[in-house]
Image (cartoon, helix red, strand yellow):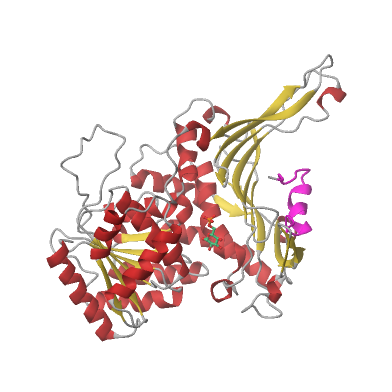
Amino acid sequence: MTRTWQNPLRDPRDKRLPTIAGPCGLVIFGVTGDLSRKKLMPAIYDLANRGLLPPGFSLVGFARRDWADEDFSQVVYDAVKQYARTPFHQSVWDRLAEGCRFVQGSFDDDAAFDNLVTTVADLDRVRGTAGNHAFYLSVPPAAFPLVIKQLARTGLAEPGPHQWRRVVIEKPFGHDLASAKQLNKMVNEIFPEESVFRIDHYLGKETVQNILALRFANQLFEPIWNGNYVDHVQITMAEDIGLGGRAGYYEGIGAARDVIQNHLLQLLALTAMEEPISFNPRAVRAEKYKILAATHAVGPFTETSARGQYTGGWQGGQRVPGLLEEAGFAKDSTTETFAAIELAVDTRRWAGVPFYLRTGKRLGRRVTEIAVVFKRAPHLPFDDTSTEELGQNALVFRVQPDEGVTMRFGSKVPGSKMEVRDVNMDFSYGHSFTESSPEAYERLILDVLLGEPSLFPMNDEVERSWEILDPVLKWWQTHGKPEPYPAGTWGPSSADKILARTGRHWRRP
Ligand code: BG6
């Protein structure tokens, strides 16, 4: 049963205070992994520090290590000290540490899961977690079925009256449509869809949520948000990091499965969707699904898609290895570290407007942005020479790292001649707001504990996203290797050709 606890001390008219989670606990599987240490544990502390966790909140770690509760607490402490966003307060930490428990075991170990049942029951008794527990699967996908079946076998998946049980699943949700369907079916046999929270951490980012605010809270943009005015949309997620240390996850997966299937298609959905009738989770997700249902990859893929693999090069003044030299990758690995595709959205609003998506590792710099590029003015009453340096107007959502929005338009260059050149008008979070943005995982973990599903993709969105990507993946499988590109550049030349064939070009952010 989905239930939101309301803090009796909170005045609902006070918009400054976010809702505090009711009595509950969180169990993390895969607690020794990087995600847990770098993102989940710090986010939990930051929530506690902001007063958003209930007083008896409890955190249970489950892993194979031979740890006592105190060892686990120490690991959480170290992670908090190193990665938390907000300042360290001893009193907040002490309270959180009182609720830390550790259960040792592997996922096929029935006795360990029986111990988990006892631990959870004990927390309900001594910490007042009230039978409300979320199970976070920060584990490799191959382990999902095992853990979920154990949760079913032990009854942990089943809430008692007035209690809730929720499962949080990290991507990847399968590796193609068929496996995603299978996974969703298996999960939904045990947890009802409203208790399943699939994490796409991009949806937890402030700047991503701002896409909907900017589009639907203003009069300025919506009238021109269509194929009459928009020439094309480019969505870029560029990273400067390489894949050292991540072979176990990334080899055989590649850039398209890693981020296009989830983060970038979600960004496309938010950019292109129609206005929801309200911000009710069902209404927002329905609009996102509709736009994904209308989206397909445009062919021929030899001209409209590109895949690349970084080779050694220079980045930030340092020599960096190529993928084939990174530990754990096969010497003849064909895993792509760069992917770009062209999509079409078959609706009246977007007919004829290409959506270009690209992502890559070891690119020129770290930047994620959505650029809505507008058509040229139908008539320019200037000499040709006056507008030589005038490009196309663009509205750019700067998702990270320099969060904000840029509007790009032509302006007269000061002087006696009429010369028009592109200029930028910037909104930056840092200048306009004093609060710093919470980390995506803070927002998402809190939403799980509150039972607020808006920012989590539903099973049909996930399946539809695979359906969009599958034809490209299949084509790549049978058409050669990824094209090499040197680290520190903007990817393979085949990516430029996708846009060049229609006289367009990628932005150099
Ligand atoms: C993850 C991908 O989902 O997102 C990683 O698996 C990627 O490959 C990461 O590095 C990027 O996240 P962020 O928040 O740093 O843009």
Residue 157's image quarter? bottom left
Q: Is residue 331 left or right of residue 197?
A: right
Q: x%, y% of residue 121?
A: 16, 71
Nearer to us in this view, 31 or 445: 31
Image quadrant for the N terminus? bottom left
**Residue in view at x 36 percent, y 43 percent:** 283
Above/below status of 179 relative to 38 = below
Q: Residue at x 12, y 61 (%)?
A: 161
Q: Chief secondary structure of the magenta span? A: loop
Horizontal side of residue 304 vs 198, given as left or right: right
Question: With 267 as the anchor, is 507 left or right in this view?
Answer: right
Is residue 239 or residue 347 the one in the foreground? Answer: 239
Q: Is residue 301 above or below residue 368?
A: below
Instruction: Answer yes or no: is residue 363 visible.
Output: yes
What residue sits 71% from the left and 70% below the top? 321
Residue furthest top as drawn? 416
Residue 65 at x, y = what percent? 37, 81
Examine the structure image and report whether residue 507 is included in the region drawn in magenta: yes
Q: Quadrant of the C terminus?
A: top right
Q: Is residue 153 above or below residue 7?
A: below
- Specify the segment rendered in magenta: 488-508
Would residue 289 be seen by someone viewing this image from the given angle?
A: no
* Residue 28 percent across, percent down from the top left: 34, 68
Task: Determine the quadrant in which ligand 1 lies.
Answer: bottom right
450 in magenta: no
Residue 469 spot, x, y in % from top left: 58, 61
* Nearer to me, 356 or 48: 48
